[in-house]
Amino acid sequence: MATSTWIIILSGVNCQEAVLHISNGAVDEEYCLVYNSSWTPLPLTLSGAMEYPLVNLSSSLLCTSAGITPSTVQGKAVVVMRGECDFSQKALVAQDMGVTTLIIVSTTPMSPPSANESEFKKVQIPIVLMRYLDFLDAQKVFGEEMLVKMYSPVMPLLDPSIVVMLLIAVVTVSLGGYWSGCVYILNKCDSGDVILYSPLKVVIFVGLMCLMLVLMYFFSRYLVYVIIVIFCLASATALFSCLDALLDLAMCSVMRVTVLGKSVSVRSVLLFFVCVTVAVVWGVFRNEDRWIWILQDLLGVAFCLNFLKTISLSNFKICVILLSLLLLYDVFFVFITPLFMHGESIMVQVALGPDASGEKGNLEVPAEPSTPHEKLPVVMRVPRFFPWSQNLCGMQFSILGYGDIIVPGLLVAYCSRFDVRVNSPNKIYLLVCCIAYLCGMVVTFAVMLLTNMAQPALLYLVPFTLLGSAVLAWRRAEMRQFWNGTTYEVRRGQDECSILLSYFHGPCCFSSVNG
């Protein structure tokens, strides 16, 4: 919950990724390139790109033209090795010999080539960086007979992954709030095992979050493994709680056996092994971007649902204090910290991982295509639905911090419990707060797309949810009760499931009624 910022991760930002299309007439392959879009622009489509023969000078650094016959490279694309001299110097040497395109192969992580403004004006040919391992692979496939084209596909402004992320967030918040109300009315699980009921507790809670975030920023290379282990344990426990509740909802029988004189639920044992297996599989394959995001999101949803069921806020006053402090926390660590941290946002850096390049568009592609870097498992991740060519340099994700679900979700859960307390019709507080959350998320997306930068989502979610629920309580003349909280007690002797059936119009939901 330490990171609560909506971020669109772009492995390539501001069109600084490109595609190298290589062919020999029979075989075609494409590879990742990095370039500076403000230096030498590239065509947007393959059909609009010029094709050139490729000359392999990877044994040369091309800091001078010594040893190279201009006629062998004139009108052709050239591959040279990175190092010793500036990109602009290599480019000017190549340009003077009539080279049409300069490809610089790199054995180190690649960032867009740069130079001062005067050098920008002198260079007229495209300059791109390519992984050295990719070039070796191309040599194995094509030998020395290569025809190359380069282009930089346009990334769509609005990607469907945003809709998927919106659905995950809204459904999780709604189900978490609903579950909290179910548990509260059953009076079996105490609504929440941990209750924040005093302003001092709230301040301490937020202070600990700030401390944890700062520690993760400065010591992320070490703490990341501690967080991963904690996440595996917590998410396995949460998944067990969610699946056990669903099996209760499905009226799945609980068969018990006696082991060493103790009664053991067979269903619970099987469920335990399933949940542990899912968490272990995620832990082992956590850097396999192609598919592991599905398990991470599954465990993340379970974690958020269980958190909202377990933690409860005692009244609206505590909700206002907590959400307001976390709004300031979110804005400070996203927008203010770059002012004194050399342009880096602590929140964004923690969310992206210790080896990520950050939010400023400073793209850095690893020297090896498969090189992973550890990321904190505190976000939902959905891959962007780009064509394959736009993922050559690495999969690109939309991410949402757990805090953007959990923090407003605590207010949604309080609204759900208040519905139970005052027996409000149609769960009106829960419904209005969920709609307010949806509106806040939509505004977050809109601002993010318009500004093309990471947004502290709580800046929009907190006002929408707090104002929405407060206006409803005021209109219903229940503001005093809503602000201070009230008491509700299930009448003794009344069947718990009948209460749920009468209020929630369904079977015993999300609770363990079979013991």
Image (cartoon, rainbow, N blue to C red):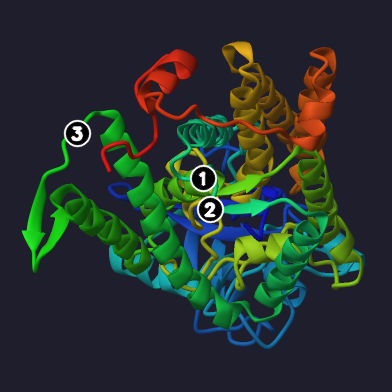
- Which of the marked residues, 3 or 2, is nearer the chain's N terminus? 2
User: Would you name the residue on which mark 1 appears?
Assistant: 190
- Secondary-structure class at tag 3: loop
- Secondary-structure class at tag 2: loop
Q: Nearer the viewer, residue 267 or 298?
A: 267
Q: Which mark is residue 353?
A: none
Q: Position of residue 77 (x, y in %)?
A: 55, 61
Left or right for 451, reference 259: right
Which kind of residue does numbered mark 3 sit on? Cys
Which quadrant holds the C terminus?
Answer: top left
Which residue does the image show at 64% across and 15% down from the upper left? 424
Which residue does the image show at 63% across and 23% down from the upper left? 419
User: Would you name the residue on which mark 3 appears?
Assistant: 252
- Secondary-structure class at tag 1: loop
* Residue 452 visible at all: no
The answer to whether 326 is drawn above or below residue 91 in the figure is above
Which kind of residue does numbered mark 2 sit on? Asp
Which residue does the image show at 83% across and 13% down from the upper left? 475
* Residue 264 visible at all: yes
Foreground label between 3 and 2: 2
Number of numbered markers = 3
| Occupied quadrant, residue 16 | bottom right
Foreground label between 3 and 1: 1
Tell whether label 2 touches label 1 (CB within 8 Å).
Answer: yes
How many residues crowd around disc 1 within 10 Å: few (fewer than 14), some, or many (20 or more)?
Answer: some
Q: Position of residue 438 (x, y in %)?
A: 66, 26
Q: Nearer the viewer, residue 392 or 193?
A: 193
User: Would you name the residue on which mark 2 appears?
Assistant: 193
Q: Position of residue 495 (x, y in %)?
A: 37, 24
The answer to whether 300 is drawn above or below residue 209 in the figure is above
